[in-house]
Image (tube, coloured by chain):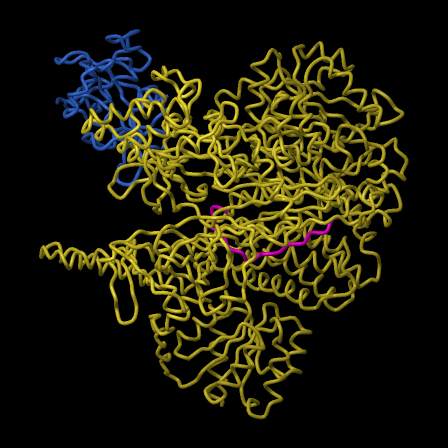
Amino acid sequence: MQKKSKVSEMGKVTTFYVNGTLCGIEILTIQEVNKVTDITPVPLAPDHIKGIINLRGKIVTLIDLGSRLGLSSDDEEGLGGRRNIIVHSQGELIGLLVDRVGEALEVDWAEMAPPPGNIQGVQGRYFKGVIKRDEGLIGVLDVEEVLK
Amino acid sequence: MAGISDEMKQAFVDESLEHLSSIEQDLLLIEEGGADIDEAVVNKVFRTVHSIKGGAGFLGLTSLKKLSHEMETVLGHVRSGTLVPNAESIHFLLLASDTLEELIHYMDDSDHIDISHHIEALQLLSQGVEQKETPLSQVQNKNNAETLANDDMPKWDGEEPLLKERLPLQSEELPGEKELPGKKELPGKKELPREKTVSAVEDVHQNESAQEIKVLSGDSHVVFRLSLQDLRRFRDDEYKGIFFIEIPLKGHDDTDHKITTGIIQEEIKNYGTILNTCLDLDYLPRIGEKKGPFFLVLFASILAAEELGVLFEVDGNSILQLETDISDNPGEDSPGNERHVKELPREHDPLVNGIIQEPIPTLESLSTDTETVNVYPNCEVPRDIEAPNQKILKGKEPFTDAFDGGDIRPTPSHETADATESAFLEKKSLVSETSIRVDLTLLDTLMTLAGELVLSRNQLLQAIGDQDDRATEIVGQRINLITSELQETVMLTRMQPMGKVFDRFPRLVRDLAATLGKKVKLTMKGRDVELDKTLLEAIADPLTHLIRNGIDHGIESPNVRKAGGKDAVGQIFLKAFHEAGKVNIEIADDGGGLDGDFLVDRAMSQGLLTKEQAQNLSDKEKFNLIFMPGFSTAGEVTDLSGRGVGMDVVKSNVDSVGGQVDIDSQPGIGTRFLIKVPLTLAIIPSQIVLTEGERFAIPQLNLEELVRVPADQVCEKIEYVGHAQVIRLRDELLPLVRLADVIGVERTYYCNKTGERKKDHRVKIADRRSFRNDFVCLMEEGDIRPLPDNGPGTESEKERRQACWTDRRYHASSALNITVVSTGTMKYGLIVDALHDSEEIVVKPLGRHLQTCRIYAGATIMGDGRVALILDVANIADMAGILPVEVPGQRSMEAEESAVREGSHNMVQSLLTFRGAPHEQFAVPLNQVKRIEKIASSHMETLGRMRVVQNRGMTLPLFSVDEVADVSAIEFGDTFLVIVFEVGDREVGLLATGPVDAVETREITDEITLRQPGILGSVPVHGHTTMVVDINEVVNHTHSPQAETVDPVADLPGALEKHGGMILIAEDSGFFRNQIKAYIEEVGYRVITAEDGRVALDLIASHAQDLALVVTDLEMPHVDGFTLTRTIKETPQYAHLPVIALSTLADDSDLAKGRVSGVDDYQIKLDRDALLKSIETYILRN
């Protein structure tokens, strides 16, 4: 990518799909992306919590991003493509379960537009902003807000 | 001189703190002894201070050296008998030792810390001795002069308001004080003028456990504490705000304090809720305004500040509204405040701010004029200028009387002393340990194990590379062994003696008792009992709280005690001991005890308990009410114990580390708390259970026993008490709950077995299910599920039995697996689908999103890498609504038990019965049994005369009763049972055959008829003569003691002998001993060390030929340097040995004394070059 002379702040965003919606998370908050392994369900936990997994000796809470954002994902079969995005949050590792991980894109934060009230049915408050790309609109998630 | 490295400093800090940790106790001992001096103790304290002085001098820490020097001087007088230790002198020494500790903690800044007042006080003490004057009047006069000359001490000359003076002064003195609480203006409505006597601040500081707001007075004493939670609650209620009101007592009524505070309270109660009150005597009134002490109130009201001002007849400046919004985002404020907290330990600690801050009863009589007030510039003696001098001089006594009966704190001095106390504790906890002392041998063991582990890894890699299964297996076993040993050893390094916590209590008790005007004697036992560091830290606060409570509420005042026929001196017992793999800590007092009915009344009036619940409570459960969150006995909670952690926090703290608290109390006799905590935390043995196809772990700590109810007996065993299902277990009724119900209701009925199995045998399951549902209905009355055709109500018992017997599949699968768990206060049965092994699991915390799921205590990773949740049985009981209310029947059982206990002749014995030969029944005490394993006969190996079996990665030696005792040989088929015991430190197995049963019997063991090796005696069980096996005898008889393979402790090769000379160093301070040793060894001498003169003499005797020189310290326990030297010089064989004495400060008298003893040379501690030169000289001369 070319360098731009205007005040820009380059960064990278990992993109992924949640029930067809293209979202992104700033790459620096991501620890790793994993295949979905053995999930231990936690009975009585809130609905959007898929369970807990063992990440090399650490217990990581796995959150179903679709259900958290209110995008009901009904195809449980497509689990093969599903991935855990492990993010850092308040000194803790938390897994976000997404449908499919796309590419990591280089973005200019200066180009990020404030989020609309709602992105494909998802409340705007979960997003830091949106970035326009050829693939479509990428809603950049505010991880802390999602994890609240 | 060699450069001072960080390691050396650290070594000095560690050692000094270690010594200081006991100084407090020793000083108190000295105080107790009075004129009757225990020289050993005084010497010990003296040496401690002396070593610190030496180290400080060596490291160039001026303040530290000065202070320790002064302390040493005073102690010297005590030792020589010229100064009789009394409360006063010990008080100064205690204060000085506190500061000493602080100086050491903040070593790098220590020279900036002001110690002048300590120095003064101590100097006066020692001068007093020299001038044969009462030290106090010295302190007094000197102080007055001092106050005028040096504004260090706040003065009050009747014209200047004290606070105005003090605050700025402090900030000049102490660097880094910019964030002093008084300076941060409250974001409240009004800005208080600086010269106002009250300036308050909210200190929102976030600590992990509880957030609280401290309302600080201008001089940063904590006046009130209020948890953020409470604050929010009040804000969310209709109250307009929380106000901090200062009501001058004199302004209201000049006659009597008692009436005044009472009246005020009654008056303001009508306008809102009083959160907290206190009488603040710290604020000096201006001479013109004849206002007495202020009554401070923390008050929530719907009124506005202005209206309150009118109501209470105070001016607007005396009312301060607290900004409650701040609590919403404490994060914003925390960084600054955190800094503030960290930087201000000294300011928080009033101990440092003045010479005397606490009342010392013995001082009273010595004070003879009004000037006394000046001596205690910021102490608690009320500056009530209207009060006659008598009052002031007599300290708190008259005030105690005046205020007794009031709802506020009983004594005026209370407040400050409390602040002092909490500051004291705060300081202690602020400095949490970052390093830990570990036994060197333990470290060596760890090192060896680590080496082994590396070695095994290499072997494993090789074995895998070679695809050698056998080798892999062997290495696997090896790694298994190493890992468990490593785990154990690492755990050991974390073990700390209880003394660490216990040692702070004598001081606490002394100060509290003095403050409250009570006489209390503290007896402690079990200081050596060791406990994991984390656990120790976790129980420190609860223990402190219980002890405070004990003194504050438990122990009555001397008058009451005498009236009740008790000794005026109250007793607090503190005892730690091991029992059944747990550490028990007992805190008992012989005070007033708890009044169960009063507690019930309170709980009911606070809406925590319904009438029905109350009726069913046993005494114990009534006492347990004090642990309920929100419970308070407002009538009796004073600020002293009422603030900070409450009893519910005590319980939750103890619960959080898997412990239990138990109360026992008798009105008028006393109260006893028993805290049980596991030895260690991180790795706990747990029972793995299966429900809904998921594994769960239940900590063994909570597990009482496992019960399997065969399907055909389910009908008879399950009973109902009201709506509760219970099972009768050994005449005791246990409430039952299905784990599946607790964790997810919908799935229960359809999925009682794992999903897979259901799919496999669909038809049969369906078949079975109807029967099972029959069961479900039977067990769960009032269930939503429709009953089958003929419900249990109509079906006769006989028919149902018939059904049970005719359906085999039913029989096979629907037995109930019950884990009987205990929450400490109650037991219940948790029904699970299947029981797996018991395993040692590593507890991992759950993420924040799962904190709301209270039924889990954490998670763990199983052998296959999957995660299993750890159940919190206490919270499950809550969730399932199992009331800790005893079901009828159980009570009678308990009564019966206690009746038996009182009779105590025939105790209930729990026995595990089993058989050897089919006709011979044996029993062992159930509590000795660790577990029972079922093992295939083919797995048993015979090695020599030993039978062993591989079990849980260990070789389990097997024994049988017939090897020792004259009984028929055991017969086993394909499988046999092994009852596993722990004998010594290892597990052993006792061969057995079924049926195995647990029985309780009250029969007395006949220890004559069948007594023989391995058999303790006999007892009738269900009409059979049953031989009680003594497992220790069986093992010892069979087991020849040779087997132990202990690593031979390799003899260390003798140190290289370059010069041929060996030097003995006698020095009690490990720090110096090691330093000197290192110096001397560096130049090639052999060195032996002794930690005191006595050891040195022994070493001299045994190494007489090799020794070339002795280097000795002068101050040492048992035998000091002078005596050592004299002994050497007087014994002809040793007289040739040159003796070099080491001293920190070459004191003339010491020098002379040393010369007389025969010291050859003096060296200053620790001038390396000079010392080495001197050694060289003397060795060459010989």
Which image quadrant is residue B191 in? top right
Q: Quadrant of residue B124?
A: bottom right
Residue at left offset 60%, top offset 90%: B1131
Compared across the picture, whether B402 is left or right of B459 comes to right
Chain blue in the figure, letter: A
Q: Is residue B952 above or below residue B323?
A: below
Task: Give percent across and percent down for residue B777.
Answer: 39, 22
- Say whether residue B713 is visible: yes
The chain coloured yellow in the image: B
> In the picture shown, does residue A137 fall above or below B1085?
above
Q: Position of residue B618 (x, y in %)?
A: 63, 33
Residue B55 location in percent, x, y?
54, 62
Marker count (numbered): 0
Residue at 41% from the left image edge and 64% from the top image edge = B440
Residue B173 seen anywhere in this rendered image of the structure: no
Q: Magenta stretch containing residue B965, yes or no?
A: no
Give the quarter of the figure containing the N terminus of chain A: top left
Magenta span: B520-535
B343 is higher (above) or lower (below) than B1132? above
Between residue B54 and residue B309, name the one nearer to us. B309
Q: Nearer the viewer, residue B687 or A74?
A: B687
